[in-house]
Amino acid sequence: MFLIPENLPIELTPFTFLLGNWSGTGIVSYPVGSGPAIEIEFSQDMSFTPHPNGRLEYSSEARDQAGRLITQERGYWMLSRPGNQADAGPGLIPGNGEPSISVREDLELWRNADKGFDIEALIIHPSGISELYFGHIKGARVDIATDAVMRSPNAKEYSAGKRMFGLVDSALLWAWDMAALGSPLKSHASARLVRNDK
């Protein structure tokens, strides 16, 4: 059971189990070229912060065993629904009108055939890669896969990703498959994180 914060935007209710700060460790095992797979352990800090506009801000940092930064990720997660007049944008154009989800009963209209919710996630990397994920959230599990990947001409080759997040015995477990560096979609990294909210 998850406690829903009083001021949480209604459309973020399905994401309740993710909210807060998480820390833990994980492993990377991924082939690079024709050589042996890269295998390392890492530590990770991850956070999910709700915003009044119905978006969930995502942040992650991973470090190697010596404490050196491996990578960072930033992004926004949200229900997959058409934008309406109440939504701000594009640019600095403010929203105007009634939101499509204003009471908890409205949220039920967005359930999919599997009794979960369709979601979107935008994730950017400082290495020049941006990912657009689509997927679903049901109970305490998220499954998302890339619909589009944009790369700077200077970024390393990366063409697809698939991620799973799930809450098991109060720990957040995640796994990330990727297609990169000439390899097809395959297991890349996984971790176990525990809530560390102060």
Image (cartoon, helix red, strand yellow):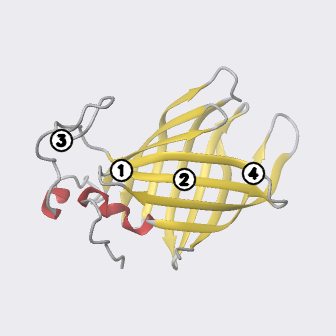
> The disc labelled 2 sits on which kind of residue?
Ser
Q: CA distance from mark 2 to mark 4?
A: 14 Å
Q: Earlier in the sequence, mark 1 or mark 3?
A: 1
Element at badge 1? loop
Which dot marks residue 55?
1
Crowd band around label 3 with a 10 angstrom C-alpha radius: few (<14), some (14–19), many (20+): some
Does residue 38 show up? yes
Q: Earlier in the sequence, mark 4 or mark 1?
A: 1
Outermost residue, right direction? 35
Q: Looking at the image, which is closer to me, 57 or 186?
A: 57
Q: Residues within 10 Å of mark 4 (few under 14, many from 20)?
A: some
Query: Marks 1 and 3, how far apart in space?
Result: 14 Å
Q: Which residue is disc 2 drawn over?
A: 59
Q: Please tell me whether mark 3 sits on a helix, a strand or a loop.
A: loop
- The answer to whether mark 2 and mark 3 are in CB contact below 8 A is no
**Residue 69, numbered label:** 4
Q: Nearer the viewer, residue 188 or 95?
A: 95
Disc 2 versus disc 3: distance between alpha carbons?
A: 26 Å
Residue type at tag 4 = Leu
Q: Quadrant of residue 2?
A: bottom left
Report the residue at 28% width, 33% height from top.
Answer: 89
In this rendering, the answer to whether 6 lies above or below 83 is below
